[in-house]
Each structure stands twice: as structure tokens, then as C-alpha cells.
Amino acid sequence: MPEEIKIIALAIAFFAPFSWAITYLIDGVCKQKSRIFILILMLAASIVYFMTYMKFQGHLEVYTFLFPLHAALVIVLFPLLYLYILSLTSEKNLSYRKILPHFIPAVVFFLFFVLYEKVMLNSEDDRLFIRYILELTYDAEASSILKLGKMVYSVGKTIFILQSLIYVVFTIIKMKEY
């Protein structure tokens, strides 16, 4: 029974933001600029939850293939929420100069993991890397190249935690100001 509950919870976690994204697409994204941020946020969240489902259900081939995208989208969730609130509460249109810096960490991690997985690792090492970061294999089995990937992954987790806290504080401040 607990396994079924986990599957249902993950399916709902995927379906809720995905259905909101579809609603925004149907209703028209261009009616308000803020809807672009919420649309991207909902799509990103649904992909993150889909990837979480793939990870927990043991579909490591799919998870391995899409891992760079997952690493980037996790890091972009809170900046997107902040930009959505900022666009709702600001009278001025947000310029690209104000928007783009929020996505730099996500782009850096995406590019690193694409290069790392697709260039530095062969397909067997790629699968071993995913098993290693998910702690399905032992440290003793890991080569230095796999340890490099796990170290960058750990840095990404730390950045995600710090960034989440910072963006939540910024979002609350912006909402209080409004």
C-alpha cells in the first residue's frame, strides 16, 4: 500500500502543475507578461516531478538521459516563482537584463552535466554516475571522474538550498512591499 500511495502522490505532483500550464496555454499566455513566468514555472515543476517519479520507480535509463535537464530545472524553480511575483507586483516591464542573471546557475549546471555525461563519460559510466549520485553504489567503486560529478552535484544541491531560501525571502519581501 505505501508504494501505491507514493505513486499516486508523484502522479498528482506531476499532474497539478502540468494541468495549470495547459490552462495558461489555452487561456492565452500573452494576456499578461507574468503568465509567461508562471507557465514556465509550472512546466518546469511538472518535469521535475516526472523525473522524481522516474527516479523512484527505477526507470534509470530515462532519468540518466534527462538528468542534465533535471539538474537545471530544479535550480530554476524558485527564481521563476520570484520573477512571477515580481512581474505581478511591478508596474514596469522586466528587462532581459533583470531576468537573465536569475538563470545563470541553472544554465551552468545544465551545460556542465551535458558535457560531463555526454563527452567525459561513456554510456556505462553515465549509468554508473547516476547510480552513484543516487547512492545505489558504493564510494569504493567510484573513479575520480565519477567523484568529480558527484562533487559538482553536491555543490548544486547546496546552491539549490541556499538559492531557495534567498528567493523565498525575496518573494516574501516583495509581497509585503506590494
Image (spheres, helix red, strand yellow):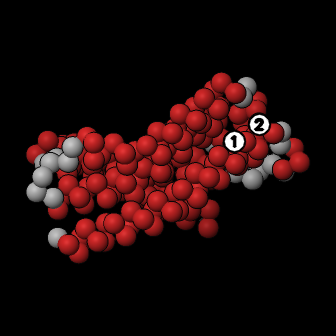
Kindly check if marks 1 and 2 are in contact, taking CB atoms under 8 A apart as contact: yes
What residue is drawn where x is 65% and y is 46%?
Answer: 152
What residue is drawn where x is 51% and y is 39%?
Answer: 108
Q: Find residue 76 and report its horizontal and vertical position in percent.
A: 42, 49
* Front residue (pair 78, 6): 78
Between the residue at mark 1 and the residue at mark 2, the CA separation in whole angstroms equals 7 Å
Reading the image, the residue beneath label 2 is 145
Q: Amino acid at mark 1?
A: Gly
Q: Residue furthest front?
A: 97
Q: Amino acid at mark 2?
A: Ile
Classify 62 as above or below 166. Answer: above
Q: Quadrant of the C terminus?
A: bottom left
Res. 17 in view? no
Within-10-Å neighbours for mark 2: few <14, some 14–19, many 20+: some
Reading the image, the residue beneath label 1 is 149
What residue is drawn where x is 45% and y is 67%?
Answer: 165
* Front residue (pair 149, 32): 149
Q: Find residue 124 and report its horizontal and vertical position in percent.
A: 76, 30
Res. 106 in view? yes
| Element marked by disc 1 | helix
Q: Quadrant of the N terminus?
A: bottom right
* Image quadrant where residue 100 sits: top left
